[in-house]
Every structure is written in C-alpha cells, then in structure tokens.
Amino acid sequence: MGIGFSIKTKCKNIKSFQQTLDNVFQPFGYDINHQSDVSVIGWHSDFLGSFHLCYKKEKGILKNSYSVSGYCQTNIYGPGFHKAIIEAVDQLAKNHDNTIEVEDETGYFVTRNFTQLRTAFYHWLKNMFMAIQEKPYAYLCWPVYQYQPVNQPDIVITPFGRFRISEVSEQIKREGIESFAEDFFIWHDIGTDARLYRKLALHLLWTACYFMDSNRSETDAYANQFILYCLEQAASLDTAQPFPKRLYLEVCKLHGHHPIALNHLTDYVPPFPVGYRHEWLGYHIGNLTCYFPGNHLNEADGKATVFFDMNGEHWHSVRCVAYTCTDGKTNFAPLNAPVIAEGVLHNGKYRLFDMGIENPSSGDDKPYPVYTCQILSPDQFTLLTICAATEEDLHDYAIQIVKRLQIRWQA
C-alpha cells in the first residue's frame, strides 16, 4: 500500500524519448538509467522514490510507435517530492510530441492543492503506523529486497532511521500525525530547504554510508561526498537548524575533506546511533538469511553473490550460492576436511569445514585460509566459501556468521 502516480503516453523512437527525459529530469537533480525497454529515474538514491518507465512495441502492421507506461511511488519521500516530480512531468509534457495521461492517486495533478496533498500523505502515514503497532518487530517503508537490519521490540526500522513505537504513539496522540510526519518524511515541505538537505543526508547516513574510507571504492566515495554536500548545503541555507557535527566530521575524515566552520551551528544529537552499516545486516539467499558486517560491499559473480570488505591486511570475504533441490531431499556433500562447527537451525542444519590454505595464482598475493559452510534448509542447499587474511580472523569471522544463520520460511 502506497501513494504515487502513473503515466501513459506513446513515442515513435525510444532513444529520442529517452533524450527528452534526460533534458527534462537531469536539471531537476534526477539520475537516469536507460535500457532498451526501461528507464529508471531516481532522486539521488536507488533506495527510494524511483520513477520506472517501460517501453512496449505496439502491435499491428501499420503501427510504428511504442507505448510508454510509468509509475512512481512517492509516499516514502513525502509530499514535497510528489509535488516536485509532478512538476517535472509537466515539463516533460511540454517537450513531448504526444499527450501524456496522468493518474494521480492523491488528486494533486488535477487540483494542485498542496494542503490536500499533504493531508493524503498524513492519512497514509497514520494508517501505516497504526498497522505496525501490533507487531513485535516492525519495518516501515523498508523494501524486502534490501538488507535487513536487526530489530528489537518497540522499534520500527525505516529508511530514515529507528523510531520507538511507544514514543511515536504518544506523540501522535498529543500533537497529531502532523508532528510525526515532519520527522518521518524527507521532503515534507515545498522547495529544497535546509531541513530537506539535512534529512536527505541523515537518510544516506542511515542506509547508504559504509563508514569506510572513500579510497576503498567508488561506492564509498560517492556516498561520502554526497552526504557532505547535503550537510554543507543545509548549513549554508539555515545556520539556526541543528547540525550533526560528529557525523559530519567523521565523514570528512573518511573522505579527506576539509570541514567547514561549525562553532556557529547548534549541535544535532540523534535519538539513536546513526548508521545501519555499523551493524551486522541480513541478506536473503533463497529461503535463508545470512548476516554479514554492514561495511561489506557485495557484487554478483555468476549465480553467486560475493560479500567483501577490502579492509587492507585484515580483509574478509564470503561467496554465497544457493541450489534448489526439487526432490525435497538435501544432504551434506562429503568432504575430506575437518569439521570446525556444526549446528541445528529451525528446520535446517549446517556444517563448517576447514579447507586449509589457498595459494593464489598471483605471486603478489599471500596464501590465505578458507572455510566452507554447507547449509541445509527446506528444498535448498547453500554453500558459503568464507575467507580471511589470517586463520585467527577467519575462525572468529566464520563462527559469527554461522551463529546468525536463519531460515526464513518452511517449504
């Protein structure tokens, strides 16, 4: 359940239409990724607020055009974002040869009444928050395909940080949903003000920042740089707004950035320690959830996913691959290797083996120890290849991983 809008139109040439999208949306600050059959328009982050457009060749011999359909879910960012992207669609309509049909669930495309738009967002947020209060562990606006932070009772996980459910309930009773909406939505008001930039920075600090040196990867450099840009924009637009000084200085150090003067700014102290990636995070691998340190990058390697930290002489990595067992039977594969640990999961089990020392093909790389973990879950066999720079690091690292294994569902 969400809030958003959809569009429909036609185009004769996909590449030409995509160029029009670039011309319209990029000046508004949107990032665009084009493929042959789809365009994805995102506002500073792949995590939230993407506008997906799909292209389909129209049938018929005389047809020489493509249908274009798109949808954007806006409730996560907020009413200010909804207004801004509708205005970008207005500009697209002026630059496109064909009529663009828009269906806006809030009615804002027709009314252009921002007060009514914000009321629709308040209504959605209140309903969603009421729904999670009965759950022992709650996630709100958290995509199922993302990593899963560990939750605790009376806490809701959101892309904007943790909130204590009981405290928010009291706040809503005392002050109304509007006060919580101002805390929750990144883009609550009209325009790009200091509050928006600070909240966007905090969102990225919570979800996207690895708290690693920018020299480690392009991913780290981009996140650190954009966080600093948003915070410095916030400071320049409103010096009276509380500013997260400690977090700012931490990211400055990671990025090798000279900090701005902070003496004239009021310090902002968040209610919870900021940054899910300071913690161990869960990743879904079929019907299994594996937890790895939040500072790990990950990338696909064929059918496997590799998690790694590139942490200099103390590096760690895990290669994960899952196989479906259609006959309903899963068994450990026989290995001529010592068993380091084994255990029983809910409706499953695992074994951790010491595979000895791997000698890299490159003469510049040092030999390193390798463990293998076989995990049996309903209709699934999962293999983890766990490596680290030293035996001591590997043992502690692997034991922490197998202790956190969870099976998500029963076949």
Image (cartoon, rainbow, N blue to C red):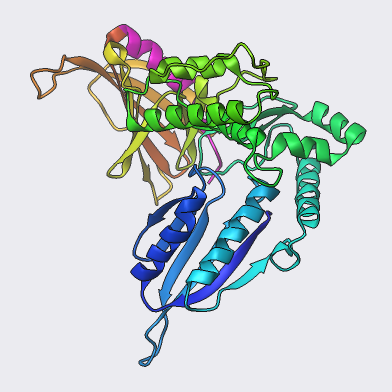
Assess whether residue 400 is covered by the magenta stretch: yes
Number of residue marks: 0
Q: Which residues are magenta?
A: 392-411
Percent x, y for residue 237?
A: 62, 31
**Who's the residue at 27% across and 44% down the image?**
302
Whether 21 is drawn above or below 374: the answer is below
Residue 403 shown in magenta: yes
> Is 124 drawn above or below residue 320 in the view shown?
below
In the image as oriented, which residue stretches furthest toward the top?
Answer: 392
Identity of the residue drawn at 66% across and 33% down = 195
**Percent position of residue 14, x then y:** 37, 71
Closer to us: 127 or 185: 185
Q: Name which quarter of the figure residue 163 lies in.
A: top right
In the rendered image of this protein, does residue 114 appear above or below residue 198?
below
Percent coordinates x, y for residue 286 in the rendering: 45, 43
Position of residue 83 measured from the top left corner of the image (x, y, whole percent):
66, 55
Give the left or right position of residue 85, taking residue 30 as reference: right
Which is the main secondary structure of the residues drawn in magenta? helix
Question: Which residue reaches farthest bottom?
Answer: 62
